[in-house]
Image: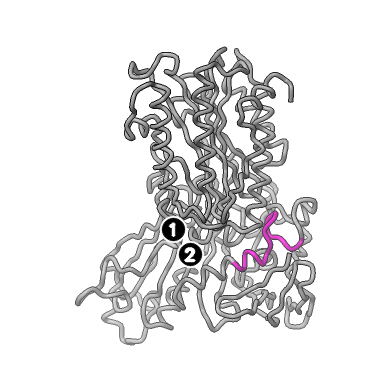
Amino acid sequence: MSLLITNLNSSQFQPIIVNFVGKKGIISQYNKYNNKRYTSLNLPKIPLVLTNSQPLTYSTKNEIKENIGQISSYTHPDIIKTTEITPGVSSLQYEFRRAKLIEEIPNHSIVIVGGYGLRYMSKGIFYKFHQNTDLLYLTGFNQPDSAVILEKDTSLPRKYKMTLFCLPKNKDLEKWDGPRCGLENAIKYFKADEAYSIKQFNKKLQGIIDQSIKKLNRFPNVFTNTFIKVNVIDDSNDNDNNTTSSTTTTKNKIIDSFSYSTSAKTMSIGNTDPGESDQLATLSAYLRHLKIRVPKSKWPKESSTYSRNPDIIKSVIPIINNFRVIKSPFEIDLLKKVGDITGEAFIETYKGTKPGLSENHLETIFEYNIKFRDAQYLSYIPVVASGKNSLFMHYVDNNAKLKDGDLILMDAGAELYHYVSDVTRTWPVNGKFSKPQKELYQLLLNIQKKCINMCTVKSGKTLNQIHQRFIDILAKELSKVFNRQLSWMEANDICPHHISHYMGMDVHDTEDVSRSLPLKKGMVVTIEPGLYIPYDDRYPKEYQGIGIRIEDDIVVTDKNPINLTISVPKEIDEIEAIMAGQK
């Protein structure tokens, strides 16, 4: 497939070439070629200078010949192409993502996107590392303790400067932890202009701020996903009124301090909604307590004094989310692959279900099957809820015995190369739906199909409107089953969660994007209607304790939505045939 590379306001694309290795970091410069339409196979090669006297050849292909601490074409040539940074996503795609972000912000702005550090289950026992998805989206860098700073400068060939921070090479530590990317490969592989140790992050950030203040004679616009403490210093006694660096005099004293929290709220409720301290704890330890010093005279004023709350340090997350919410064909392809893996794992879990086993047994079957098919992670802790446990939305104990006659509700997904699935299915423990179970299941399945069909641009609907329509239909259909009129509010109690959320690199993706936004082509959403009949005398006894949810991952198109998880069986006869060994 041909791809026209555009660079902000022009049609030129400038790949990076390494120029020289500096004393404090690795520095690169640029070259450029004329606007053409290129495929990944016919990109022109351009000269590379590693030192001023050693010309080499460099193209957008990654010619790394060592392990860089994550999947690459060197270690996994069967999985990733030489033109890709991560499986399925090319170097040019990452450049395009950064260029789109830069185009959205004022000139001379600074973007800070911090990555995660290792998280620990107990002393010395760490969890498998999972990167901040905004950093992944912009760079593809998938290692602990990393961050990127982008400085917009329209005078530069690609309109910005990219500085990547990571852990430098360390032979002693790498004997224990495995290979690292290191600073040199941060340039060669990830196309940074400069690379420094993450331990220098706060110092380098202060230097960038100081340079910007000197150039602009004011504090620059900053867009970040981190927490920043601003120390305002009194520079009124400086002999040189043009001095703007906060480090040029020891006379400057802090006269005020205030912090900026730019973390995004999640759409989740209950115990899945992290507080600010929890979000801070996920960042690399080198990024949790960033401090910058700013001369009072260069900080935005409010009336006659400086402002404690200027609109100058903002969250970058909403801007990135506006891009991430629309998936590229490459992303949809990855989401389809992980959907297919999920389908195969669910089928094996159906086959392994029988009375007397534990819910955890089914969780194990599912996890084994996704990882056997090359998924790297479960995309979240699965809900494996049998019988009355299905009435709890986030039940994850998964320790009850499966009883003959009960339903099992399983909400589970996989992650493949940074893209996830999110699927729920409900099926009978003994392989046959009872009459009440079948009645409610088919009712909900019919509603789900109607709601999936609404996931088009042509419908003009929003996710909130689809949810409202779902509750309308649910109230109407359950009124027929229970032989009494259910109100909208009662139906909403029977399904207390929303029917949908955006998904992609995160299960609850792009949380800053409103569900009141009209659906757009390329959005990927879940459609997950549920019904949970409580033990309540308002409802016939044969229906009490039944919990059902059916969830699929849907690509919004102009007219005909695409079901990415269609391979996960959900028709009653299909499920019963699989469990009877007929498929």
Residue at the image position 61 percent from the left and 57 percent from the top? 141
In the rendered structure, find residue 112 and report the number of the disc placed on it. Answer: 2
Q: Secondary structure at mark 2?
A: strand
Q: Are the residues tagged 1 and 2 within 8 Å (C-beta)?
A: yes
Q: Earlier in the sequence, mark 1 or mark 2?
A: 2
Please determine whether, in this image, residue 322 is positioned above or below residue 349.
below
- Circle 1 SS class: loop
Q: Nearer the viewer, residue 118 or 413?
A: 413
Residue type for callout 1: Thr
Write the start and end of the magenta stretch as one range. 82-96
Q: Is residue 436 visible?
A: yes
What amino acid type is highlighted by mark number 2?
Ile
Tell me the residue that label 1 is attached to. 226
The scheme the figure's colours follow is: one colour
For the image, the number of numbered tags is 2
Q: Residue at x 46, y 55 (%)?
A: 460
The numbered mark at residue 560 is none
Quarter assignment of residue 552: top right
Q: Residue at x 44, y 51 (%)?
A: 462
User: Quarter of the image containing the C terminus?
Assistant: top right
Specify whether residue 132 is painted magenta.
no
* Badge 1 density bin: few <14, some 14–19, many ≥20, Cα 10 Å: many
